[in-house]
Amino acid sequence: IQRVLRDCTLEMKIHDSISNRLAEAKLTHLEEYTIDSLGSEIGQNFHLINLDLVARGTNGSEIQSRTSNMCLQIGSEAFLKNHLLPLSKKLAEQTLQLLSAQNCPKGKFDVILAPDQMYMQIHETVGHPLEMDRILGDERNFAGSSFVKVSDFGHLQYGSEKMNITFEPGRFSEVASYSYDDSHLKAEKVHLIKNGLLTRGLGGLESFERSQISPVASFRSSSWNRAPIDRMANINLEGGTLTLEKMIAQVERGVIMHSNKSWSIDDYRRKFQFGCEYAQRIENGQLTEVLKNPNYRGVTVPFWNSLKGLTQNSTIESYGSPYCGKGEPSQVIRVGHASPYALFKNIEIFGGG
């Protein structure tokens, strides 16, 4: 593994402007056993890999980076050279492009978000707002509340009819896959949002007793000394019918954005702003110039209702994080999100310094 990581950094050394190169991996083997007073005993094993690649470039006062993160439950196939070495070189090449690129324009444009940005969009504007303990007021002091109300389930048109969000804790290789939550509720795939309509929340058995919203196996703790609370697991956006080429072809004036760089969202998970690492302008259905410092902003429900297209399931990519924080006392836990490319219409975008 060390040799592969070293070779990744060597692949990034394509120009003197690449000032910093990083390839690092964290491998975790986790065994969990839970026993309750009713006589249940459940054991689960997890093999987790978190792999980061970073190419950072400088040109005078200009600093730009391209990164890639793999956070999955997989084995040694994560370190295949025929995947990681070309990816490492591509990141360095794109970093050089950014050093000489124009800033992202300001205005209303159609925006295509790549899966490595969609995972953060899903996390912040779908996952956290649907956690039932937030909706019921438990997290208001620390992690924030939610604009969603109990009365919204079955009534709120959260997004366009193309929006289908699933809670899928059994998805192969995704980092937050498991068989049972910490209340011993069996983990099953369910729709949280179906054809844009909000149907279920991320609430376990305790929240069900308070809200009467059907529970999902989302009652999780980060360790033995923390109480289980309502948490995300794998929250995924299902694919559509388009190829990426056809999606780009239907955009007359737009931008495609890749890889999250920054984020900001209010305590009710309503108003948000995201920055990405890398973008390209789309003009009359064609990709044109590279753009640096791309940012976009919006309001959760109107934004998701502007969803006009999704690429096919074959384009879905899985991302995640082991560091989602919540709770008092604080606890961090792993979460995963899978998504295709997504097209949103008439979104406010802007550049940055």
Image: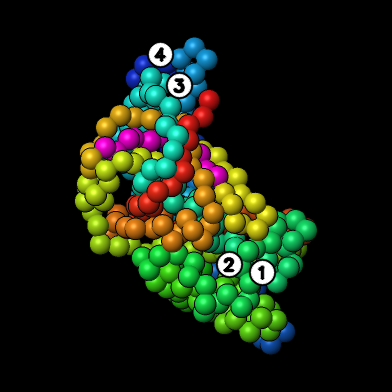
Residue tagged by mark 1? Answer: 135
Q: Mark 3 is on which residue type?
A: Gly
Please, what is the three-letter code of the amino acid marked with disc 1? Ile
Mark 2: few, some, or many residues within 10 Å (few <14, many ≥20)?
Answer: many
Image side of residue 230 versus residue 347, left or right: right
Q: Is there any visible trace of residue 100 in the rendered image?
A: yes
Q: Provide residue 58's location: percent of width, then percent of height.
A: 47, 18
Q: Is residue 139 left or right of residue 187?
A: right
Question: Crowding at label 1, few (<14), some or many (≥20) Cα neighbours within 10 Å?
Answer: many
Q: Nearer the viewer, mark 3 or mark 2?
A: 2
For the residues carrying marks 1 and 3, which lies nearer the camera in this image? Answer: 1
Looking at the picture, tell me which residue is in the foreground, 147 or 346.
346
Asked if marks 1 and 2 touch (Cβ < 8 Å), the reply is: yes
Q: Earlier in the sequence, mark 1 or mark 2?
A: 2
Q: Earlier in the sequence, mark 1 or mark 3?
A: 3
> Which stretch is magenta?
273-283
- First-in-chain label (3 vs 4): 4
Three-letter amino acid code of the residue under disc 4: Asp
* The label number, if any, that marks residue 57 in the structure image: 3
Magenta span contains residue 278: yes
Whether the magenta-drawn stretch holds residue 32 is answered as no
Do callouts 3 and 2 mark residues in contact (Cβ within 8 Å)? no
The residue pinned by badge 2 equals 130
